[in-house]
Amino acid sequence: MTARQESEFIEKIIVPRASAEQLFRAYKVSKRLDDDISAVCAAFNIRLENGVIADARVAFGGMAAIPKRASACETVLRNAPFNSATLERACAALAEDFTPLSDFRASKEYRLLSAQNLLRKYFIELQTPHIETRVTAYV
């Protein structure tokens, strides 16, 4: 939804170029890789400064009626050290951010665990940037 009036149109959308300090990844869990509605999708963008998470943006689709930012998770991550203890606190905070729905694609338990595991995957990939993990999930 936008705030535009009936006679107005969106001329352009500007997406700022990510800086080298921003670490962005997006993931999708679905029955098929292409052309399928995901059970869970995630987008993560953090900015690291000297081993500390200076800023964090975490968003999920499939966890609520509409895609939504995970504000409790982001709060845990901001100004925290980039380590496994921070990661596990952030994963626990996802349960505060979402009460996932259950439908034919996935149960609420599966969705929450998938969201937590996608966050773990993101951290693993950032710790070993030369390795890109490839996971196929079947619902």
Image: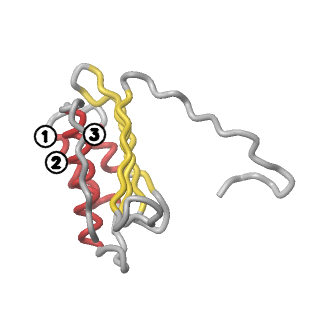
Crowding near the residue tagged with mark 2, few <14, some 14–19, many ≥20 C-alpha atoms within 10 Å:
some
Q: How far is mark 1 from mark 2, CA to CA?
A: 6 Å
Q: How far is mark 2 from mark 3, CA to CA?
A: 10 Å
Crowding near the residue tagged with mark 1, few <14, some 14–19, many ≥20 C-alpha atoms within 10 Å:
few
| Residue ID at (22%, 40%) | 123
In the displayed structure, would residue 11 be above or below residue 38?
above
Kindly identify the amino acid type of the residue bearing the numbered disc 2: Glu
The mark found on residue 88 in the picture is: 2
Q: Quadrant of residue 85?
A: top left
| Residue ID at (47%, 58%) | 67
Kindly identify the amino acid type of the residue bearing the numbered disc 3: Leu
Quadrant holding the N terminus: bottom right
In the displayed structure, would residue 92 be above or below residue 21?
below
Residue lying furthest left: 85
Q: Do the residues labelled 1 and 2 touch (CB within 8 Å)?
A: yes
Q: Position of residue 98 (x, y in %)?
A: 34, 63
Q: Do the residues labelled 2 and 3 touch (CB within 8 Å)?
A: no
Dot 2: element: helix
Residue lying furthest right: 7
Q: Badge 3 is on which residue?
A: 77
Q: Badge 1 is on which residue?
A: 84
Q: Where is residue 84 in the image (x, y as percent from the top left)?
A: 13, 40
| Residue ID at (22%, 30%) | 130
Kindly identify the amino acid type of the residue bearing the numbered disc 1: Ser
